[in-house]
Amino acid sequence: MKVSLPRPQTEVKVLEGDSLQERFRALETSPVLRARTLHGLLEVSGAAAFLNHPVQSQDQDRVTLHYRTTTRLDMISQRLLQEGAPVSVINATTATHVIIAVFYGAQAFFVFDSKNKISEKNTEMKKVVKKMTSLVCSDLHLDVKEKTKSLYDCSLYIDVGSWKSPVSFDKAVEIYGSLPTLLGSKGERAVPLKVWLYPLKKLDKSSVCAALSEVSETLMHQAENILEHLRKQIRICQNLMTSQTNLTVIMWFPALKDKLIEFSELLKEYKEDLQREITEMDEVIHVKDEKVKNKLQNILARHRQSPFSAEKTNKWLENKETELKTLNDCKAADITVVKSQAELQQIIGHSQMTRVMCLTLFSPEAKDLFLATLKQHIESHNTVQNDSLLLRPVSINQKVLIDVQLFIAAKEANDDTEQTKFIAASVSGDCFQEYSVQFYHAGTIMSRNVKLGLKPDPPQIAHIQHTNVSLKLNHLLNKSTERYVVEYGVVSNDGMDNTWKQIVYPEALKELHVLSGLEQDTEYQLRYAVADNQCMSNFSWIGNFKTASAARPGQPSVKMNRDAIIVSWLKAESDEDCPVLRYMVEYKEAGLEGWSSVQTQGPECECTLTVPHSTCYRVRVSAVYENITSKPSEETPVPVDVWSIDLSVRKSSILLEVLKLQRLKKPVELMGWSDEENEVKGFLQCLPYISQLRFTQPERISCEEWEKQKRSFLLNLCLQAALTDTPGTTETNVETLLSVEEYEKCGFLLDLCSHVKDYESQTGRSVLPALQPIYQSAPAAWIIKLSERKSSILLEVLKLQTEKKPVELRDWTDEESEVKGFLQCLPYISQLRFAVPHNKTTRSWDKRKRLFILDLCLQAALHQKETIEETVKKLLSSVNYQKCDFLLDLCSHVKDYETQTGRSVLPALQPIYQSAPAVWSIKLSERKSSILLEVLKLQTEKKPVELRDWTDEESEVKGFLQCLPYISQLRFYLKREPAVKFLLKLIVSASECDTNQGEIYTELLTSVCSYTSFPFDEDNLDDFEFQIEQCDFLLDLCSHVKDYETQTGRSVLPALQPIYQSAPAVWSIKLSERKSSILLEVLKLQTEKKPVELRDWTDEESEVKGFLQCLPYISQLR
């Protein structure tokens, strides 16, 4: 009865498209099954559920991999079909068909969607997916670039297995690799892929039942295309609303989003109605009935005539995309978009915005007639209305888009941003035609339709005069001209544009147009536009011109007599057509604004000014013509008078009255004054009227006494200014007094502080706070002689500052109280400096300066232990002092103090020495080794010591031995021969101490010398010259030790074995200068053979034999 045939076959391919028809084609569905699936009459699952996968978004990259495998074909016997079935069997069942064959197998769809927006072409995804299909799962290796491209989500639709979708790319690769095993070893888990049906009644040969007649496949494709198109349009709506590019615009205009939502909902409702209508035919779709075919044709025809047709809905969506693009372009170009008349009027009426260009856009708030038509069509149960046939969305043509881009380009090219503003208006109303440009000037509409693409030729200048210019303006080709709109403005000196003025010439037919009311000798810029009753052109390119200048007179000269000032000048070189009528003479008090003027009776070139010439004046002259006045001549100053007065003879109140009568401040020269408080206060009131205060020394007073009196008078004036403090006057008055010549500002302010402190002590009044603004604007650095002024005064001054400033010391006293006093000033000082006096040598000055620094550090250790590190750091930075030398001198200085007083100070300095230099560098010829020992004891860890010099005194050598327990490395600074001798003394002394006192100094000494770069710094280890120097040093040391042993009979060399065991990697020697026996002794001290490099040698037989004895201890000869 059943025949089973094996049909093993596997096919893998990448689907080219993502439409519904492509999906049906991949599944090989018949038209009837397609129709039933579309209309929801069939439930799909497994691989067939791929039909319901969401449509691809326009912001999404997608590749679909289709896997199909078949196992067997099962069929019923052909004999059964030929013999037929009993009539009783056919009549006993309600079935209409019998299954005659089943094709078994399985399918899988892997849908890869990019996680991000499309950044590369779809082909890049295909390359990765195809690589997945071309290799076995375990052999799949992606490079870094391909891994980046494999960041996809994978939706899985499969006939076998129980995986939950979506899965990662790696999981998808794993599943793909396992597909061949999923059906079982014998294909027992395969599912039906295709079923063949045979009409049951055909088994009864007497039946005349008609065969299945399906609806035309072309009509079914048309229905599928319509439903697919509706689905895509719904998806496009969603994309427009959710696209990252449109989010800002959608937030600006919620009404725009509402319309997209409404359009999407109407499409969904219409799609459901259409799908339901087609579904109602399904009951009879397999019956051969021409009426069914006609009914489906009518449905499709009615759709094409409805407002939901692809042409109309596509046009509406294109319009919305264009509207969104326009708004996004405005946003990208930083163009303000206003949404109401009130906002528009606010910008137009802005006082500083003379010109406004406004692009009128669509209004999202306006009623959409097309949406209303769609809604009406659905409410009328999809009945086509006659009026709806005529209504279709208004198309936004290409010219509109070009105009928008022209507007944006004009905005980008706009240089006059202060006066001209480009905006867009989304406002409904009869006055706002969509996608037109309106032009406003000074709050008034000039044109509602500016054509930015039209631009007239630049204006032509026909004739230029002093105050007007004649223009020749051009027409536009093939355009009528009713008026010209001309804008002009003055070009400022810096080249920036000033305010644009506007004038309209209604008589467009005139050949020349006169622009008047201009300033003479002034450069202007000019542009114009052409207008008629329908539109206005864009403004022309800017043209520049300069008005003619009137000749001006020469610079005046001034003569003064007792009662008047006589002014004369060279005449202006004018034209005969425009003669000079008279001259205008202007005069001004120097430093004050405003000019006074007089005019001559005629063109004479002299004028007498009857004004007091005891006041400072400036004069200038202008030529007066019939309609204009020339620019002024160059100015001439009038000599300045100086008030000279002796206030010990005259009252300051008299001087004040005289100064008040002046228009301009003048200098005052004092020859004497009174120290009475009333007179000092009286003169203080004169200061606002004085430009400069001077002093003239009388012959009867000595220079020293005069300076003393002058200083006392100025200090009293400043004190009274502080006592009578009014906002702003104290600082001004003190600045005036500080401008006195030959009076140093630092000294003055310090003297003023001392003077005020004395006054406060005598009266109990507080005055110094009133002077704080003066001290806050004090000099950049304070200069002081502490030998002449108390440090307490400097402290008061520094406390008045808002920020730290440098202090420069020119002298000081060594008194302990003053040193303590200056120490309190350090927290208010940013940097301490020293100035070398002319009467001091540099060496003696440095010695005194260092002693002062050491005294300060000592006092800081005694009284400011908490801030000792910061204090020492600041003091050390103020002198040219090596840190090692400074810390050693400080230790010595403190030890002396401790010896004299019996007090313990050094422990307070321990934080300083714990953060000491990485290497101690010392000259033992200048400093005691006991000081170095004290310093080293203060450290928490051993550090290297570099000897730059030393003494051969036995006590100092033994003293240095005591330092060895606190030293990590002993180094020598150059001086090879003296260093070798000193080291030998150390070795001998250490040996004696070990013998006599039972100490271990020899072991300590060899340990501090047993390092690779001995006796030099490790930084020089790679330097070839230093390597040679190191070898010479060690060979010299061995030679001296051998000589010592010969002379004394003592054995010293074995104790040095640790030093030579850490010797250089290569021994470098000149045998022409040294005995081979010395090299032999050195090599014997080593525990391993090392290379020897010969730089020179002798041919003497004894030396050659001697060197032969060295060979057993040499690893390599170079």
Image (tube, grey):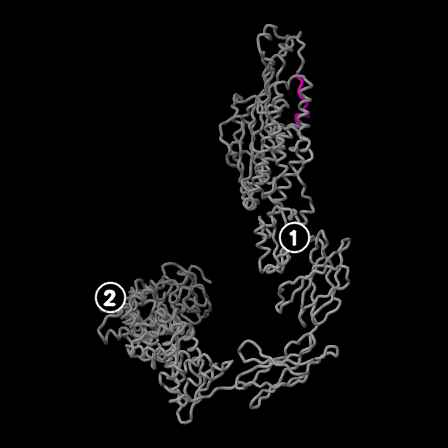
The quadrant the N terminus occupies is top right
Q: Which residue is mark 1?
A: 438
Task: Say which amino acid is labelled 1.
Answer: Gln
Q: Position of residue 542 (x, y in %)?
A: 69, 62
Q: Which residues are magenta?
A: 212-221
Image quarter of residue 387:
top right
Callout 1 crowding tier (Cα within 10 Å): few <14, some 14–19, many ≥20:
many
Callout 2 crowding tier (Cα within 10 Å): few <14, some 14–19, many ≥20:
some
Q: Nearer the viewer, residue 634 or 135?
A: 634
Q: Secondary structure at mark 1?
A: strand
Task: Say which amino acid is labelled 2.
Answer: Glu
* Residues at marks 1 and 2, CA–CA distance in whole angstroms: 107 Å
Q: Which residue is mark 2?
A: 999
- Please report the residue visible at 71 percent of the width from the left and 66 percent of the height from the top: 515
Above or below: residue 465 compared with residue 380: below
Mark 1 or mark 2, earlier in chain: 1
Label drawn at residue 663? none
Q: Is residue 1007 left or right of residue 173?
A: left
